[in-house]
Amino acid sequence: MLLSIKNLSKVYHPGKTDVKALEDINLEIDSGEFTALCGPSGSGKTTLLNLIGCIDRPDGGEIFLDGKPLSGKTGDELALLRREYFGFIFQTYNLIPVLTAYENVELALSMLGKPDAATRKRVMETLEKVGLTGLENRKPLELSGGQQQRVSIARALVKKPRLILADEPTANLDSRTGEQIVELMRQMNENEGVTFVFSTHDALVMKHARRLVQLHDGRIQQ
Amino acid sequence: MSYLFSFAVRNLLRYTRRTVLTFSLLAISGLLFLTMQGWFDGLDDVTLKNTIAFKTGHFQARLATYDEDAPFSTSNLFPVTPAIASALDGSKHVKGWTPRVTFLAQADNGHDSWPCVVTGFDPATDSRVFVLTNGILKGGKIDPNGVLVGRSLAKDLGVGVGDPFFLTVRSAAGQIDSVELNVSGLLSTGDPLVDSGGAFLPIATAYRFLGTNLVSEIGILCDSLEKSGSYRAEIEKNLPGMKLWSYQELAGDILQLSRTKRSFLNFLVFFLVIIGVVGIINTMLMSVYEKTREIGTLKALGFRDRDVQRIFLIEGFLIGLIGGLGGVILGCLSNAYFVYVGMDLRLFFSKGTDIASMGVPDVMYSIWNIGAIIGTFIVSLVASTLASWYPAKKAVEMQAAECLRTI
């Protein structure tokens, strides 16, 4: 099992009252899955993705990655896990505006070693896979929303992660572009064997998922 | 590390105007500091050189029992014995020596009188140690009844070259005599004590007034100013009953004034550094808050906290590097102007003001201070890097999830 979640809970403290973002979450995800976390806004989709991706820490329960618990790991160890295990795709793309499409994708590899000819080949191949050949020298602001999201997907994909976590990847796109992006993710899942877990509340996107996990008020509703 | 460096460079180039303003802040600080440092150094240099050239030489040999509290007391006088002359002539480090006798007198022009310090000098040997003739503004012919008068004193007394000049002197025996001399020249030495209250006359004339042929000091010039300190013990050993006073000791007041000026400069430097540091902290904090989502993204991509911290520290370092270099270049250009062209201080005073009486030359020249140039660069670099430490820490403290939630 790639990912196993046991009794996971997360509470936010925005003011004087506590807000239970996630409560008693139990979930298992295997390699190669193409899973959608569905639910309305505030249901806990982003929180769950953040906890799975080690960019937030749970208040209770445990997450096992390849059978190993994440609790007790230091900040540096979690950073290494994010570097090697996960790829992230964000709703607002989160590309670095001063870097070109090529550099944004290369950034994901830069921490793994000094860029060389093999790195360049890998980045260019990934950009080709997401349909961005010829646009590699453009900066994010010179690209459309769909193209930016493709760069974001290439950035997540280029380091060949075990799991790609996508938070509402189509929310900022028109329905046609959104569908193209989900289709692209699906192709990557099928052709490259990359596991995808993505959140959405868009019915059109949900239909592409092979597995749906419904969240409501921080709980899973099967 | 190279990608962190490259990333930091891109960040600096992102907000060009802000980055240039921050660079400018450091560069202007460097410019101001180096220019003022050059002025102060130049002023100190000319003042000290004048003091050595006109008053102190490298050393003054005085009686070991010399009373500093009563510098014009007759108990401080001594004869230049053949043994002293032989010891000084025989010293391999002594380039020249000359006797002088200094005493207090009252100068008057028949209407007003002013106290003045009179120095009797030996016209035959004085130029071996001092450059009195370089300070002669007008006239300059030395004759037994001639006196060289500080230009401000002459102005106060309303006398010029060739005019009669009266001195009232108490002789060694305590008898008060008034003698008439002629102003043979006006002196402008840059030393306010000489220019506004000093007179020089041949030592034979002084002996005649004082009724004694004793001297108060022997001015000594060594073969090297820098090494003179190391010669002291050797020269002093051959002058029993005498003590050598170095030019630093003799110019104590001037050096103290210089230290006071340095304190002011140090305060200015501190102030400039604070302004620079606050400016950099402000720039970097703005940068951190503007890039909150990016920081979150970097952390999500697997950047460790120290990687993110390094990006901001490198940005601070680069600001210091370029700002410091800019400051050094601008400061050197400004300093070069004042080194080679100088600053005419008369422009800052109303016409006819005697600025020599204030102890400053008419045209002030800066000098090069390599230590200050290197120091400016290093302080810029260190202060800028340290200033970015706090913003970098703020960036590290941000949780990735919170950063990503930021709109």
Image (tube, coloured by chain):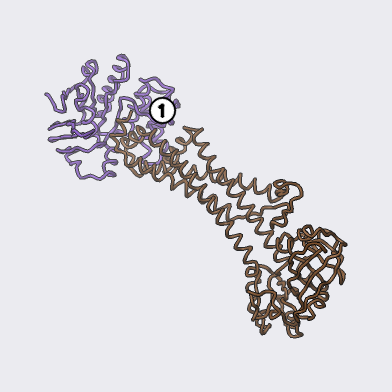
Quadrant assignment, res B101: bottom right
Quadrant assignment, res A147: top left
Locate residue B275 relative to residue A121 in the image: left or right.
right
Q: Residues within 10 Å of mark 1 (few under 14, many from 20)?
A: many
Chain A: colour as depicted: purple
Relative to residue B57, is residue A124 depicted above or below?
above
Looking at this view, is B214 or A60 the one in front? B214
Quadrant assignment, res B257: bottom right
Residue at the top extreme, as displayed = A176
Q: Position of residue A126 (x, y in %)?
A: 36, 28
Relative to residue A30, is residue B77 depicted above or below?
below
Image quarter of the N terminus of chain A:
top left
Q: Chain letter of disc 1?
A: A
The disc labelled 1 sits on which kind of residue? Answer: Ala
Chain B: colour as depicted: brown
Looking at this view, is A187 or B318 the one in front? B318
Which residue is rendered at x = 41% and y = 32% of the image?
A103
Relative to residue B30, is residue B403 depicted above or below?
above
Q: Position of residue B34 (x, y in %)?
A: 60, 50
Q: Position of residue B280 (x, y in %)?
A: 46, 41
Which residue is rendered at x = 26% and y = 29% of the image?
A165
Q: Position of residue A14 (x, y in %)?
A: 23, 33
Locate residue B282 relative to residue A3 in the image: left or right.
right
Q: Which residue is mark 1?
A: A101
Looking at the rendered structure, the secondary structure element under dot 1 is helix
Which residue is rendered at x = 16% and y = 23% of the image?
A214
